[in-house]
Image (spheres, rainbow, N blue to C red):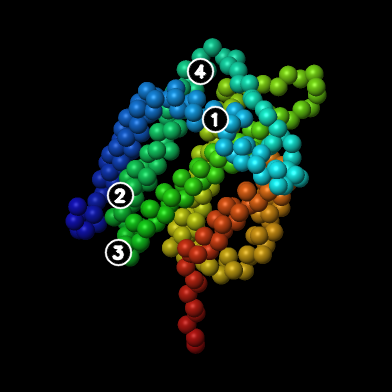
Amino acid sequence: MSELSEKEMTFWDHLDDLRRTIFRIAGFVGIASVVFFAFMKPLFDQVILAPSRNDFFLYQWFSEVSKKLPFLPDFVTKAYNIKIININLASQFFVHLTSSLWFSLVFSFPFVIYQLFLFIKPALYANERKNAGGVFLFGNILFYCGVAVGYFFLFPLTLRFLAGYELSKFIEQSVSLDSYMSTFLMVCFFMGLVFELPIVAWFLSQLGILHREFFNKYRRHAFFSLFVFVAIFSPTGDPLTIMLFFIPIYALWEISAFVVKKKPKEVEA
């Protein structure tokens, strides 16, 4: 499409483009969902349910670390096995469907973002198009880093703490399949989106809303606030767990500070 034709596009032309973009995204995600549906049973056992077993790598690593750092809490070092039960007749079938869709969305994320970029590309200036490739690659890396942090650290520690928490010895502890899956999907996918914050900061910087001076001015406030936030909401209060969560979250702040532009200097009178 030429630059002239892009400028002459009407509202209905843009609407048609948006519809085609949505159809391409839906088609790609749908095909990927079918593929994941076919292979979901081994993925479910080896990936999704892995944090519910004592041989998950993070628990094994904590067991080794505890030999040198004895102050670690008991719930991350003692042997355990979570009992997951199904209490609704159709839950296993619907979990099979939704898991396939969520895996497909995570897998399709680069394709989805690229299609959205193609849709907004005509509205970008030449220099913005030039930088878009790097932003696209960086955004995808951050998304998968966020999913990895959620899967390998945040979800297992949260699961192990909450599943082992005992209010009364008369309560038999077990976890429903629906509860396990909703927490798993929310934590992993949400962390992927949280790790997109540097891209949001870059976009706001391009619009002139956010500048590097903001991060420089409030760096100490952010460091303290984020540390307190993590200390309060982390599954445990031990220093190692707090640092495991604090380091990647604070790194997002520093990455955001790096990618935004400096505030233009005012022209001297």
Is residue 22 rendered to the left or right of residue 4?
Answer: right
Residue 170: give x, y in percent of width and height.
80, 18
Residue 109 vertical position relative to residue 214 in the rendered view, above or below: above
Label 1 to label 2, Cα distance in Å?
A: 38 Å
Q: Which of marks 3 and 4 precedes in the sequence?
A: 4
Observer able to see residue 154: no
Q: Which residue is mark 1?
A: 50
**What's the amino acid at mark 3?**
Ala
Disc marking residue 73: none
Disc marking residue 92: 4
Q: Nearer the viewer, mark 1 or mark 2?
A: 1
Label 1 to label 4, Cα distance in Å?
A: 17 Å
**What's the amino acid at mark 4?**
Gln
Q: Which of marks 2 and 3 precedes in the sequence?
A: 2
Instruction: For label 1, count other residues whose C-alpha is less than 10 Å away and answer few (under 14), some (14-19) or many (20+).
Output: some
For image coordinates 49% across by 87% down, the residue present is: 269
- Judged from the image, the secondary structure of the residue bearing numbered disc 1 is helix
The answer to which image quadrant residue 125 occupies is bottom left
| Residue closest to the eye, 179 or 8 | 179
Q: Which of marks 2 and 4 precedes in the sequence?
A: 4
Q: Nearer the viewer, mark 1 or mark 4?
A: 1
Q: Nearer the viewer, mark 4 or mark 2?
A: 4
Disc marking residue 126: 3
Residue 249: give x, y in percent of width and height.
59, 52
Q: Which residue is mark 2?
A: 118
Q: Cβ–Cβ below 8 Å for labels 4 and 2?
A: no
Label 3 to label 2, Cα distance in Å?
A: 14 Å
**What's the amino acid at mark 2?**
Leu
For image coordinates 59% across by 41% down, the residue present is: 153
For image coordinates 57% across by 52% down, the residue present is: 248
